[in-house]
Amino acid sequence: MSGLNIVNGETAAASVAYATSDDVFVFAHQTSSPATHTLTRLAQSNTPNLLNATPKVHTLPAEADPASRLHEPLSAGSLVSVVASSRSLLASIPHLYKVASDGAALVVHVSAEHRSAHASSFGDFSDVMAVRQTGFALLSSASVQEAQDLAAIAHAASVVSGTPFLHFFDSRRVSAESTNIDLLSADILSKLLTDTDITAYRAALKSRAAAAPRSAYLRYKQKPAVDPATPSVATAVRDIMHRFADLTGRTYLPLEYSGHPHPRTVIVAMGAGATVVEHTIHRIRDDSDARVGLIRVRLYRPWSDADLIALLPDTVTRVAVLEPTTDHASAWNPLFLDVAAAVQAAREKVVVVGGRYGVEEADLAPHDVVAVLEHLDGESAPAQKFVVGRRSASADLDSDVVVIVGESRHEVKILPEGSRQAIVLSDASEPDAHTFAIAFAEAITVGEASHDAAKRTVQAYSFRTGSSHASHLRYITARSAPLPSLVTRSHVVAIRRPENADAETTINRLVEGGLVVLNGPWKDVGALGATIPAATRRAIRSRRARLFVADARAYGSEAEDAALLVALLGLHFQKNREARERALGVARANFPLHFDHVRDASVKMLDVPEEWASAEDSFDHAKPAHSAHEPRVSTKLPVETPYVKLLDQVFGPRLHIANAVNAASVWTPSASDPASSNPEFGYGLLLAQIQRRDRLVDLVRNTLADNTVHTPPDLHRALTQWLLAAKPADGSRPAHKKVAVAAGEAATLLEKHHAIHPRLAEIHTAVDLLQPRSNWLLGSDTWSYDLGQSGLHHVITSGEDVNLLIVDTTPYSRGEVDRERRKKDIGLYAMNFGSVYVASVALYSSFTGVLNVLMEADAFQGPSVVLAYLPQPSENPTAIDVLTETKIAVDSGAWPLYRWNPALEHAGREPFCLDSERIKRDLEEFLERENHLSLLVAQQPDLSRTLVSSLERDVRGRHEELKRRAREDYARLLSGLSGEATGPPLAVLFGSDNGNAEGVAKKLAARAKARGLKTKLMALDDYPDVQDLASEGNVVIVCCTAGQGEFPSNAREFWRALNALSAADLNLTDTRFAVFGLGDSHYWPRPEDAHYYNKPAKLIDAKLNALAAGKLTQLGLGDDQDADGFETGLQAWTPELWLALGVADVVAEAEPPKFSDENNKLVSNFLRGTIAQELLDESTGGMKESDTKILKHHGSYMQDDRDLREERRKMGVEKAFSFMIRVRCPGGVATPKQWLAMDELVDQYAGAALKLTTRQAFQFHGVLKRNLKTTIRGINKALLSTLAACGDVNRNIMLNPNPHLSKIHKVVYDFSIRLMDHLAPRTSAYHEIWLDDKQVAGNAVQDFEPLYGLTYLPRKFKVVIAVPPNNDVDVYAHDLGYIAITEGDELVGYNVTVGGGMGMTHNNAKTYPRTADVIGFCTPDQAVDIAEKVMLVQRDFGDRTNRKHARLKYTIDDRGIEWFKAEVESHLGYKLQETRPFHFTDNADRYGWTKGIDDRWHFGMFIENGKVKDWPDFPVKTGLRELARWHRGDFRLTPNQHLVIANVPEEDLERTKAHLAQYKMDNLNFTGLRLNAMACVALPTCGLAMAESERYLPSLVTKLERAVEEAGLRDDAITIRMTGCPNGCARPYLAEIAFVGKAPGAYNLYLGGGHKGERLNKLYKESVKEAEILAELEPIIKRYAKERNDGEVFGDWVIRAGYVKATTAGKNFHEQ
Ligand SMILES: Cc1cc2nc3c(=O)[nH]c(=O)nc-3n(C[C@H](O)[C@H](O)[C@H](O)COP(=O)(O)O)c2cc1C
Ligand code: SF4
């Protein structure tokens, strides 16, 4: 043969599946497919796979449960593939979830088929899209070559990432298309999927299996314990694609852009359709350099918004998403939704529209793509939704769909010069039509291309149309993926049976003057004309065809194909003998038996008579009903339609919707019978039907048993089968497919035999009841108002197998009205009845989840209630509206997604499964009552009860706020009337994230008021309507800069609204404005990022200018880099403002004194404030700012969940406030009893995670205000305290955690307790507020603070005690430190250190971290006194005017260390002694077992970032709780957030070891890097965090570990620390490598800290993101491994290697 490797897509994929798998499963629908032939042929010939074995090929029946078969080989580590049609997918959804959660290497090759039988040449991706949320990676192939190549990539990526892949392609234009491809050799495959990868996969699978939680769903949700070495799916795919390109030269990317470098319009597509778009775009770019492009999606899941946006050129203004998806479920298709959501968030100006193709019209041709591009490029806004090439009117045309059809004039141009196209039309009965077509195309190619046929492309695509079989062929003079569109301008049309009625339409595809070859015996044109239809004659004439007749039939039916081929080749190559011989070689190879016999077959030319032009016709075709671009508007889509379509998709003919049978919608009942939409009505129908069916079962049973009825044996068998299937003897659930098959057979036979006996006739009348049904009632949420009385109640309590689907359309973000009408929760109501299946779903949150629930509800034997969410936030919502509304409702817990399946409970499993993150309070209460929540929380540790949203509370709070605002407005109005402010009006609007801009705006507003202006002040987003700006008079806008040149969160909506307006919409000629921006010109230091500086202010200024507003002043800019920060710019700008407003000369009243933190403490009455009153106020979950500042001294900070901030702000509800509580714990020592108490309190009130902090304290997060008091009481009851755990006082004292290692530790611990007591605040407020409920001292007995006085300290004060050689407490990082000095094993005293501190502010050189100075030595008995005096000096000299400059370190640097020492000594009345020598080795924790004095044992345990909670694979919280129940020693929190199980008596040692092993708590097998890593809490709770820390560092360490391990540094201790902001809670500036958060995802990278905590590090790179971090650090780490001197630590080496300079003192920290 020609050696051209012509294959179709399905065979190509199946061959790869065979070569790369141990087991291949094929579904029965596929048995007749080429894939099955290929697989069985390979297996039968014992062809080996890559692993040198013969894979097992299993053929599964179509209805088989695939998971039951896949599970065994997968869990044994076999590589498995499945070759399936998309029709099998829906039923497999529950299994797909399970397989995905197992993390197994499986590739499912799916041919995406149409559910309907119409003749589109493309696949239908609907069913594939339906499983997009199962956790499978989805990879799409767009050509036959890709079907092979991506199949191989999928197999390799699946093994490398431990993720199952679904590789899909169009059932027709890829699966069934034959073309020549470059085959993958076994050698290439084995380099792509290596033995090493397979071995690693099997090892990982084993270890994962050991740690997996028991519920499949939870396993999927939790994505447990990913092996750190396992790359993400996206990375794996990208890496494998690179590997593939290196091996083959063929390059693929997960997402790929092609087209103009600066496009205006971009199409996003996947599958064969994308190939059509690509060809078209290339051609029109060649012709006209049109600014168009294509983003081709190959890796569809996991989906990355960021990758899409990164690929979308900045110049794009319009995006069209094209999908071959029938609109089963929603008004918007899946890829469109993904693209629209991504683009909307990142590029708000870009218009995204969605189109479908291949739905009704068979083809997507280049001219259609041109039409789409022209539509997008048009003057007017493009249609949101359109259909490509849909010509005929259709009943289900749903909403405002525009039809776009191209004109067929571009296609030929797509093909390179010299290419040829042909169509062969055969009868449908022709068995080998496609084989013939391939041979024809191949022969032409070999003939045309003498020796380089491999550089040409052969393409053959065949399909059935009615009674015919059409093959569209191309010979293309270049090598590329062929155009997967039908031939529209054929050079040759060959018709094997010219009598065929489809001949005419085929001939209409001929180029003018092309060749028509008719196969038949006609001697002359007269005889021919008499046989073929008139329409065919007319067509031949009108195309001016050259007509030939080939009488291949004369050679006999066996040789006909061969003869026709030879005749056609003779015609084609009539002038080129040599070429003809080559082509005939192919014919001979294809028809070896007949070739010689037919060698002379030829064609005869006939003249086409003139009169054929007007031949009588009887086959006229209807004109298209709609022409291009004509908008078709139909009635609005009823809201329940998407769910009905889903039901239809899942249950097909089994679906029976009982109510609203004749109504257009359950919302608009039919006028003639309004009751038909009621549940009672449908229920009545259903009940009647269920009873009828039961009667039928009895009737069949009795008839079969009755000997007097002579039932024919075949009918008897069929009815018996049916009975067995429909009512299984064991009472189990009937298998629907079986019932359906039996019912079909029985129905056919009844048709034949029913007359035999009246009983059979009776059965026959009820024949429709034989079929299995899925019974549904549809309803709306209006049913929920009167649940008890409604028919719904009857349905729920009936126990019948009835399913209810209730669609709720309430947009909960604005849904207060419904709440007031006391809408009840149907789900809760139903769950209370126990044996009802209840699920709550949302189509736009999880499509696959909905399908899964519908199947579960159907399978449940008894009533099921499915609550389905489809919010309608407006009259005509867009996709994005519904999507956003759904997301808000699901995220906030207003619409939780859950399933309650009592069947599971009967099987001894947890019946409740929460599929979203949050739940409403009433639901939580139900679960608590049902005692299921505890189980649930145990299974799903991330479920934070404390964050449960309480909408009722929010709504109440909001009403209060509205009332308050109304009062203020009224007061403002009055003040205006009373003439208090008479000057011109002024609106001061601000956008601010962290308060700077808000502060400036407030100041400006206060001063304006003082100058007599009628001033109002508000956040930009609170401004009611931008149109009102026109009547505002004067507007001042103060706006900061967030993110990368982004708007702050409370200014985004304002900007969106303003920016959307043009001068025609809003004329601001009567408004004058001034804008002041706050930014930082160095926040993003790269020169190309300079445009981020103060971007929002610049944009607003330009926009207002464009809207014709007058300028009060030039744009003012404040820069954090200026000497006084933004104040510098502000001071220059404000005089201009007053001048412009005409109030420069007004002498304003002196500004009211600023209420500083110092004032606040002063008036707080010894730390009381109004905390007690605030605790009683239930209208808000928060507290007044002044009280929150006082509250810190009591050990608690108010925080809010920052993940939810934006969402809640949009909902108009207050932030999700909660409180952090810090528990003071001197030296970090806690008894087992105390541990148990902390554990329990955390469970009850604090989100189930206990944090061990960097100051050896316990920290609780997420405590609600109403639980604050109870929690603090609980802590005190356990003899611990929160007093002075935060605030401007002495904090928790830190100490080396293992005091029992030597006698010295004991002495030191006792000292720390004395010191703690001595420095504790004396106020009785703590006791009064939290413990006693009544004022102890109150005003009668005055509190007294002998050490602190009324205003306490200027800032926090931190004390630590280090015991050399270990500097784990980081003695240099604190205000006051003691270094224990020993002689023998006696403590002789302490060296004293002062002035350490970490906190600073980014880019503010006046702030810096500082290492402490050692100022001398003291004896143990002087030590407490010294602490007091150091504190007093700081109390009196610390800077109380500027909190940023108030720490002791600045007092010392401002006045000199000598001054400070002298001041302390003068307070002491004696001098400190000379510093004694000491030696530190490091600042790390000690891990593992050590034996101390008294034969007691201590175990240093690793707890990553101090987070004690039950992780899926590491239930440390339970493990420690269980240990605390019998442990006889104590627990020690370490300074690096780990834990020591201390003082284990010798006799408990083994038991303790066994316990630790049981919970994996003895695992210390981590890299040196991880063991020495530390992160602060940061997001989501810390209000100061600018970036992630605790949630991110572990994964970053994982990535760095690769470099470390490769460099052979696995066990080297390199300290690495991360904080979310420069405040420095995790002491980052002393680490050898440090990351300090700058903005989401961006960090400043510092290097060169001292390994013993003795030296500060230095900024190495600013604002780096992960990729840059890795790119920077990996080479440094590798160089370090090679170049370091013996014993040289990383921090020292980076300085020697010149990466950074050494920082010798805090003051030179910022010097580069
Ligand atoms: C996370 C973050 C990102 C920032 N990005 C920019 C920026 O892109 N351009 C800029 O000029 N300033 C930037 N800044 C600086 C702030 O705009 C500036 O500090 C301002 O004073 C903050 O005002 P606010 O307190 O009202 O939020 C950024 C600040 C932060 C915290
Ligand atoms: S370092 Fe910053 S982000 Fe981290 S916990 Fe401390 S204040 Fe919060």
Image (cartoon, rainbow, N blue to C red):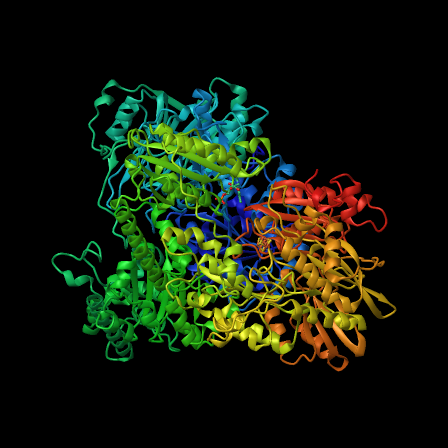
- Residue at (53% x, 22% y) in the render: 579
330 relative to 1343 in the view: left or right: left
Where residue 810 sits: x, y (%)?
A: 29, 57
Q: Residue at x 77, y 80 (%)?
A: 1546
- Name the image quarter holding the C terminus: top right
Q: Is residue 494 above or below residue 1054?
A: above
Quarter of the view holding residue 1557 = bottom right
Q: Say left or right for 955 vs 1166.
A: left
Q: Is residue 1453 visible?
A: yes
**Is 334 situated above or below 1354?**
above
Q: Residue furthest right?
A: 1384
Where is residue 1537 drawn, in percent x and y? 66, 62
Q: Nearer the viewer, residue 1559 or 671?
A: 1559
Q: Residue at x 82, y 43 (%)?
A: 1683
Q: Is residue 7 visible?
A: no
Q: Position of residue 1447 (x, y in %)?
A: 63, 53
As drawn, is 1667 to the left or to the right of 165? right
Above or below: residue 1305 compared with residue 1159:
below
Left-right relation of 458 to 1633: left
- Depth check: give the residue in front, 856 or 1553: 1553
Q: Quadrant of residue 1252?
A: bottom right
Which residue is the extreme one toward the bottom? Answer: 1547
Q: Which of 443/170 is in front?
A: 170
